[in-house]
C-alpha cells in the first residue's frame, strides 16, 4: 500500500514564506484590485474555522504571487497524488477543495487538455494539494481522497467527485456520497476504504495541508504554482498554455 505524501515541515514553509513575502504580495493585489471573483477571499488573519466560508475563486481570477517552487515540489517516486514524469522539466502544484465548484469546472473542462498536451508529452508533472477550506464536509472529503490515494485511485476519485459536482454552491459530500464516488473511481477494496476515510491521521494530514496553504497565502482555489509563479481560478486552456509554455521555455 502506498502512503499519502507527507506534508512539508512547518519551519521550511515559514522560511520560504519569509523569503518570498507571498502574503504581502497577494494582499496588496487584493487591496488594489478588489478581487472577489465569486468567493470570499481568505485574509491572512483568518482562522481555519473562518476559512470554512472562504478560499474559493472563480474563473478569471488571474495571476498571483506564489511561493518559490523549490519549496513545493515533492518529486517522489510513486506519489499517488501526482501525475507525470518525475523528471519533467517543471512541476505544477495545484490546490483544490473537493467541495469547490470552480475546481470542478477546471477538472472537467481544462485539465484533460493540460494532461494531453503537457503531462503526456513529459513537459509537466502535476502534484496535488487538497485542502479543506469549506468546513467539516471538506475535511471529510479530503480524508476520503487520501484514502483513495492509498489504493492508487486518487485522481479517479477526484474526477468522480467533480463529475457529480453541482453547477454552483458546494456539494454536501456525505459519507454515502463519498462511498459512491469511490465505487465509481474503481477503488478496489471498499471495506478498507470505508475504514480508512475515517482515520485520524488522514484527517490530520488534510488539516495540516490547509493550514500550510493559509501560511503560504493560498487564499482561493483552484490555485496553481509553477516556477514560483501563481495563477488562480478555473482559467481556460489558452491561459494555461501561455502559463505553461513560458515555464517550459524558461526551464529549458
Image: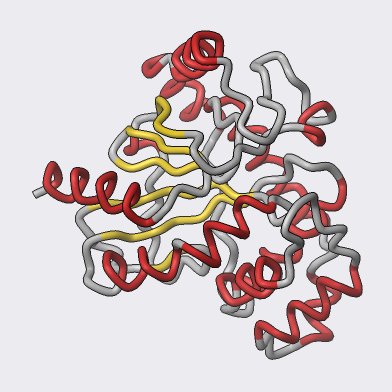
Q: Residue at x 69, y 90 (%)?
A: 188
Residue 63, position in %: x, y? 40, 31
Q: Is residue 24 left or right of residue 250?
A: right
Q: Observer-nearest residue: 19 or 238?
A: 238
Q: Quadrant of residue 89?
A: bottom left
The scheme the figure's colours follow is: secondary structure
Q: Residue at x 8, y 49 (%)?
A: 252
Q: Residue at x 43, y 70 (%)?
A: 112
How many marks on residues? 0
**Above or below for 90 versus 144:** above
Residue 213, position in %: x, y? 59, 34
Q: Observer-nearest residue: 140 or 101?
A: 101
**Above or below for 37 versus 101:** above
Residue 48, position in %: x, y? 78, 30
Q: Quadrant of residue 184?
A: bottom right
Q: Is residue 36 left or right of residue 67?
A: right
Q: Quadrant of residue 58?
A: top right
Outermost residue, left side: 252
Q: Is residue 180 left or right of residue 120?
A: right
Q: Residue at x 63, y 79 (%)?
A: 151
Quadrant including the N terminus: bottom right
Residue 146, position in %: x, y? 67, 64
Amino acid at each position: 500500500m502506498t502512503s499519502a505524501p507527507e506534508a512539508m515541515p512547518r519551519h521550511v514553509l515559514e522560511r520560504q514564506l519569509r523569503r518570498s513575502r507571498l502574503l504581502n504580495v497577494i494582499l496588496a493585489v487584493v487591496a488594489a484590485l478588489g478581487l472577489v471573483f465569486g468567493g470570499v477571499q481568505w485574509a491572512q488573519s483568518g482562522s481555519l474555522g473562518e476559512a470554512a466560508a472562504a478560499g474559493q475563486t472563480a474563473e478569471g481570477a488571474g495571476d498571483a504571487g506564489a511561493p518559490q517552487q523549490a519549496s513545493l515540489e515533492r518529486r517522489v517516486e510513486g506519489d499517488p497524488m501526482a501525475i507525470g514524469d518525475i523528471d519533467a522539466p517543471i512541476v505544477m502544484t495545484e490546490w483544490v477543495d473537493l467541495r469547490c465548484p470552480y475546481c470542478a469546472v477546471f477538472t472537467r473542462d481544462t485539465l484533460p487538455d493540460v494532461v494531453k498536451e503537457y503531462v503526456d508529452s513529459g513537459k509537466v508533472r502535476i502534484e496535488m494539494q487538497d485542502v479543506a477550506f469549506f468546513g467539516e464536509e471538506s475535511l471529510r472529503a479530503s480524508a476520503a481522497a487520501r484514502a483513495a490515494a492509498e489504493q492508487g485511485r486518487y485522481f479517479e476519485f477526484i474526477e468522480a467527485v467533480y463529475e457529480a459536482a453541482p453547477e454552483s454552491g458546494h456539494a454536501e459530500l456525505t459519507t454515502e456520497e463519498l462511498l459512491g464516488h469511490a465505487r465509481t473511481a474503481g477503488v478496489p477494496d471498499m471495506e478498507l476504504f470505508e475504514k480508512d476515510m475515517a482515520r485520524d491521521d488522514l484527517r490530520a494530514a488534510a488539516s495540516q495541508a490547509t493550514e500550510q496553504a493559509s501560511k503560504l497565502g493560498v487564499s482561493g482555489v483552484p490555485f496553481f504554482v509553477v516556477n514560483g509563479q501563481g495563477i488562480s481560478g478555473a482559467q481556460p486552456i489558452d491561459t494555461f498554455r501561455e502559463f505553461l509554455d513560458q515555464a517550459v521555455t524558461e526551464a529549458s
